[in-house]
Amino acid sequence: MTALALRGVTRRFAGYTAVEGITLDIPAGRFVSIVGPSGCGKSTLLNLAAGLLAPSEGSIDVFGERLAGINRRASYMFQQDALLPWKTVLDNIALGLRFRGRDSGHEAREWLTRVGLDGFGSSYPYQLSGGMRKRVAMAQSWIVDPDLVLMDEPFAALDVHTRLRMEGEILDLWTGSNKTVVFVTHDLEEAISLSDEVVLLSAGPGSRTVGRYPVDLPRPRNLIDLKTEPRFHQLYNAIWSGLREEVLKSHARTR
């Protein structure tokens, strides 16, 4: 089954075309990363998939049904967490369930344990480290049991060690879940390490898909040692050759 199908999708903003004519199928249960130069419309694609934006042209199907309005089968993890500062960690985790009218206390406590935050349920976001806040945001996104998880550079602001740990934790959550993840990142190494496939967008404006690269590294993956494997470097070089060309185009257009 196809989890997300974009057909000739174009999105314009006051005369500026962010993405143009994008056709893309993402199979259910896959982990797919989207990379490309800054300003190429990666976040715009996620916002379209979430139903936060409507296409100017084209259509989007979610598990075979036309998307109109907010995508109720998706959750969204933003680059900057969306935690409510006046609510405790436990209340923030439970928020999505409460919006759905579900009794959330037991499930929220289970997820508190699952993301390694036992003992912090009564804490507030300002009392947490950056990595701990990301764990709360991850629990927030996954507790509602979405079929599709949209992630917009969620670990970009973390230090390299915390980031590696969070990447491992997101893979642990995803493995065996049958959920589809669409992950936007500027970091090509991160994209390869996590994904089944990397999609490359062209330089904007009017970005389009210019490459799809299956990642055939075996799972489960040891992220600490993965970058030492010859196949990782082969994939990196293959994708970087295309990405480099688009980055140079982007730089030329902004000068």
Image (cartoon, rainbow, N blue to C red):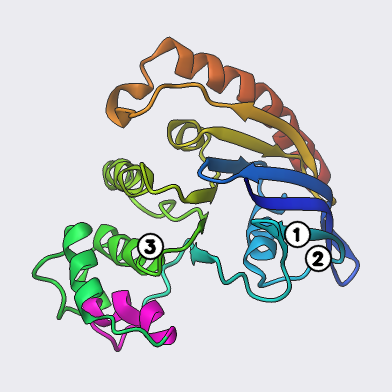
Label 1 SS: strand
Residue at left 44%, top 56%? 154
Quadrant housing the N terminus? top right
**Dividing the picture into quarters, in which one does residue 11 lie?**
bottom right
Q: Are marks 1 and 2 in contact (CB under 8 Å)?
A: yes
Q: Do we see residue 255 in this rendering?
A: no
Q: Do we see residue 142 in this rendering?
A: yes
Q: Is residue 95 magenta?
A: yes
Q: Nearer the viewer, mark 3 or mark 2?
A: 3
Instruction: Indicate the position of residue 244 as horizontal and vertical percent values.
Output: 68, 28
Distance between the Cα atoms at labels 3 and 2? Answer: 26 Å
Looking at numbered disc 2 in the image, what kind of residue is underneath it? Pro
The residue singled out by tag 3 in the image is: 142
Q: Is residue 101 above or below residue 223?
A: below
| 122 lies left or right of 31 | left
Residue at left 65%, top 65%? 47
Whichever of callouts 1 and 2 sits on the residue coming sooner in the sequence is 2
Q: Is residue 164 above or below residue 97?
A: above
Q: Which residues are magenta?
A: 84-100
The residue singled out by tag 1 in the image is: 60
Residue at left 70%, top 26%? 242
Q: Residues within 10 Å of mark 2 (few under 14, many from 20)?
A: many
Q: Is residue 83 above or below residue 179?
A: below
Whichever of callouts 3 and 1 sits on the residue coming sooner in the sequence is 1
Label 3 SS: helix
Whichever of callouts 3 and 2 sits on the residue coming sooner in the sequence is 2
Looking at numbered disc 1 in the image, what kind of residue is underneath it? Ile
